[in-house]
Image: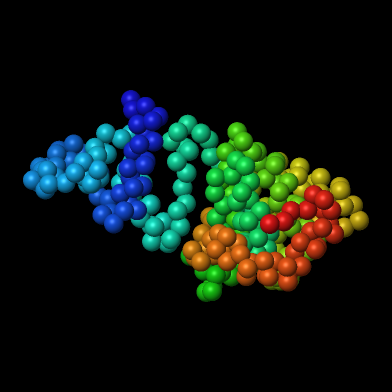
Amino acid sequence: MMSVSGELICYMIVILCVFSDRGCNTFGNRSSHLHRRSLHRRSLHRRSLHRRSLYSFPLYSCPLNTERLINKLNTLKAQGILWFSLLLSAGVQAETAVFAGGCFWCVEAAYQDLEGVTGAVSGFTGGKLKNPTYNGNHRGHYEAVEVTYDPAVVNYEQLLEVFWHNIDPFDNRGQFCDKGPSYRSAIFATDEQRSLAEDSRERVVNQFESAVVATELLPASKFWPVEAAHQDYYKKNPVRYHFYRTGCGRDRRLSQIWGDAAGGH
């Protein structure tokens, strides 16, 4: 059996060849691999070792479905989104959580630099429409963020706390200056997460007894990443993001609700 480090190398080689100019078509059985090697043998001796094609790596020996992985990575590359975790192959657990808190730029920013979070992707969920887009049709969907995290470093309960402190849980028409169905707040929980999400919501209800908590608890459904232009928006467009967030009154309202515990980025 291949060691963990060997399995990680397999992932790394696949990723490198997919995201290189050469592309990656190195999968299959040993005989097809040897056939390709013989076809390239005369050209290989003219190249230095560090420039050898990634084709020479024996991916057939990897305990992975490399063809499936390559196809998935190529799809993500075409979308401009690198959305996967190598930690799985290194024996480190990775789990996901999905939160809707109005503008996904701001929710993504709240989680992106949190210790234990390995990825935060903006997108849509909760609707039936396939392949929703930001400038096109996303009717029925919520703007949401899928958070990938290491539960050994940060747990789901902590992610829920971050969520609450970055939303207005009493607004049933949207969030802050953004109004409409797609901007409503919600927690999209799996069966395993549901009880923790329910307990978390109940604590907020008890904390604000005179108010009505509008944030919904909904079953997790397919998550659709939004176009690349909206990923890491607060990093790629810091000035525009700052003006939007300030003009929307997000931080001012969060401070009114949560005081010193209010989120912000």
Query: Looking at the picture, how far across and down is residue 71, in whole percent?
Result: 34, 52
Query: Looking at the picture, how far across and down is residue 23, in whole percent?
Result: 28, 54
Q: Is residue 134 above or below residue 6?
A: below
Q: Quadrant of the C terminus?
A: bottom right
- The residue sitting at 58% across, 49% down in the picture is 147
Query: Looking at the picture, how far across and down is residue 210, in whole percent?
Result: 91, 56
For this orientation, the residue located farthest to the bottom is: 136
| Front residue (pair 79, 126) | 79
| Front residue (pair 67, 153) | 153
Is 236 placed left or right of 262 in the picture? left
Q: Quadrant of residue 168?
A: bottom right
Query: Looking at the picture, how far across and down is residue 187, in whole percent?
Result: 67, 52
For this orientation, the residue located farthest to the front is: 48
- The residue sitting at 34% across, 47% down in the picture is 16
- The residue sitting at 32% across, 42% down in the picture is 13
Q: Is residue 242 above or below residue 44?
A: below
- The residue sitting at 27% across, 50% down in the picture is 24
Q: Quadrant of residue 166?
A: bottom right
